Image (tube, grey):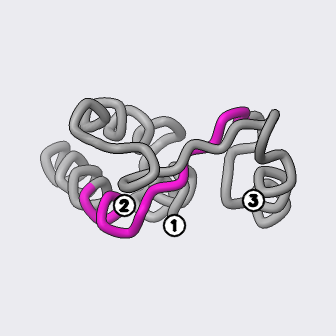
Amino acid sequence: MKTFRELDEATGQPKGAAFRAFKRLEPGLREGQDFLLLRPEHDDTRIDELRAQERIYRNSVNIVLLDDALAERLLKHLCGTLESRQ
């Protein structure tokens, strides 16, 4: 599973680009299938591990983990956004 930070960094996009792309697709997505939402009140250990691995942004509170297929869709979208700017 991938994080927004990993997608932003993989595409050279600024912080928040992958999150904004996700929000555009979110109405058609299903939690538990396309992504997992980690909340500190239930998933603090997992969130701390991701933070220690530098896979998430330091100040992130609720963490979204993207399944591989969705991460690939977002990467293609983000790469397309980069190409259209050139």
Q: Position of residue 25 (x, y in %)?
A: 25, 37
Residue 38: quarter of image = top right
Neighbour tally class for label 2: few under 14, some 14-19, many 20 plus, Cα within 10 Å:
many
Q: Where is residue 68 shown, x and y percent of the image?
A: 38, 69
Which circle's residue, 1 or 3, is located before the other in the chain?
A: 1
Q: Are marks 1 and 3 in contact (CB under 8 Å)?
A: no
Of pointers 2 and 3, the one earlier in the residue sequence: 3
Q: Are marks 2 and 1 in contact (CB under 8 Å)?
A: yes
Q: Which residue is mark 2?
A: 71
The question of residue 46 being in magenta is answered with no
Answer with left or right where residue 69 lies relative to residue 84. right
SS at badge 3? helix
**Residue shown at 25%/58% (left/top)?**
73
Q: Which mark is residue 86?
A: none
In space, the residues marked 2 and 1 are separated at their CA atoms by 8 Å
SS class of the residue under badge 2?
Answer: helix
Magenta stretch holds residue 64: yes
Q: Which residue is mark 1?
A: 1
Residue at (75, 59) in percent of width and height: 50
Q: Measured from the top left, where is residue 60 in percent x and y?
A: 70, 36
Magenta range: 60-73
Mark earlier in primary sequence (2, 1)? 1
The Cα atoms of the two marked residues, 2 and 3, are separated by: 17 Å
Separation (CA) of disc 1 from disc 3: 11 Å
Left or right of residue 80: residue 41: right
Task: Give amino acid for label 1.
Answer: Met
Q: For the residues labelled 2 and 3, say whether their Cβ atoms are less than 8 Å apart.
A: no
Task: Say whether residue 74 is left or right of residue 45.
Answer: left
Counting labels gives 3
**Circle number at residue 50:** 3
Element marked by disc 1: loop
Q: Amino acid at mark 2?
A: Ala
